[in-house]
């Protein structure tokens, strides 16, 4: 662990309940986050095996259709299987039957995607949960866009915090005057900010090469992309004002 990380942990020892830890980054929120966490494993690009192993012990795991294939490959038993099973491998489905997994199976002729149904199920839970979605990036733009907007809907309806991530890319959402600090544990390749409402105001970012202070971002003018972490900095601080802000990280 780097000196900066040790210093960070000491400084925030009283606020450990405010920290979401990912293998590549610690995220300090301005509010206490839920102690219970759910990892939704979807059927997009497979996350790095070591990355998902590091998370598996501290998350309840939901297999979303084809995401079951990865969990079978890693021999990680999910707590719930969700979907119409039209894309999961037959061998994975047989494995799920042998394990007698808890299942929520839907007919393939439906309006919502399996991931959208999973997010709706998370919204119906009695207790609040941290939601982390992986297997969320893919080769098809329509799938990726649908995943991001579906996750945004979950966030706007109360799933806080919610993050989409694998070892190479991470995206999360901020709004309502949130101020969030990010402590990367590995080199950040790019940082991008996106207005996900028509306009976002009161946007500030520090710890980067190009900083903003009380700026406005527009849905139709995404100019705050491909930022870099400032040399020697160990923290990126982002504040969101009115509107909803998307925060994207690409990892080296």
Image (cartoon, helix red, strand yellow):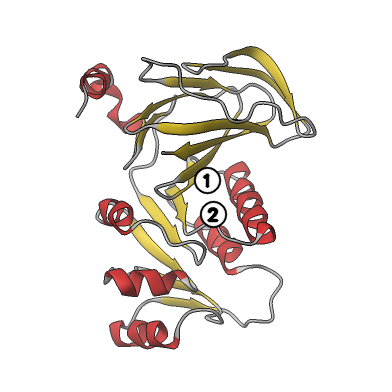
Vertical relation: 138 (above or below) 235: below
Q: Quadrant of the C terminus?
A: top left
Secondary structure of residue under mark 2: helix
Residue 59 - label:
none
User: Residue under circle 2?
Assistant: 123
Q: In this rendering, does residue 77 appear at all?
A: no
Q: Are marks 1 and 2 in contact (CB under 8 Å)?
A: yes
Residue 145 at x, y = what percent?
67, 53
Residue 182 at x, y = what percent?
41, 27
Q: Is residue 24 left or right of residue 189?
A: left
Q: Residue at x 38, y 87 (%)?
A: 91
User: Residue under circle 1?
Assistant: 159
The quarter of the picture where residue 117 lies is: bottom right
Q: Residue at x 77, y 30 (%)?
A: 221
Q: In this rendering, does residue 153 appear at all?
A: yes
Q: Residue at x 36, y 14 (%)?
A: 232
* Nearer-the-camera pick, 232 or 207: 232
* Nearer-the-camera pick, 135 or 131: 135
Closer to the chain start, of discs 1 and 2, is: 2
Secondary structure of residue under mark 1: loop
Q: Residue at x 60, y 23 (%)?
A: 240
């Amino acid at each position: 662990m780097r000196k900066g990380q040790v210093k960070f942990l000491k400084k925030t020892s009283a606020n450990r309940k405010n920290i979401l830890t990912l293998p590549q980054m610690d995220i300090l929120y301005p509010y206490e986050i839920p102690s219970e966490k759910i990892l939704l494993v979807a059927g997009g690009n497979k996350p790095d095996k070591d990355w998902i192993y590091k998370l598996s012990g501290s998350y309840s795991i939901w297999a979303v259709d084809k995401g079951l294939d990865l969990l079978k490959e890693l021999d990680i038993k999910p707590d719930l299987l969700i979907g119409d099973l039209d894309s999961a491998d037959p061998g994975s489905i047989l494995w799920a039957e042998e394990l007698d997994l808890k299942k929520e199976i839907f007919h393939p002729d439906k309006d919502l995607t399996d991931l959208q149904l999973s997010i709706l199920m998370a919204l119906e839970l009695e207790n609040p949960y941290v939601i982390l979605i992986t297997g969320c990036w893919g080769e098809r733009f329509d799938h990726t866009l649908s995943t991001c907007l579906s996750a945004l809907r979950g966030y706007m309806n109360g799933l806080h915090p919610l993050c989409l991530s694998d070892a190479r890319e991470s995206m999360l959402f901020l709004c309502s005057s949130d101020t969030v600090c990010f402590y990367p544990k590995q080199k950040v390749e790019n940082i991008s900010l996106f207005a996900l409402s028509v306009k976002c105001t009161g946007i500030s970012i520090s710890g980067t090469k190009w900083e903003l202070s009380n700026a406005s971002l527009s849905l139709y003018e995404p100019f705050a992309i491909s930022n870099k972490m400032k040399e020697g900095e160990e923290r990126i601080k982002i504040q969101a004002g009115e509107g909803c802000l998307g925060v994207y990280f690409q990892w080296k």
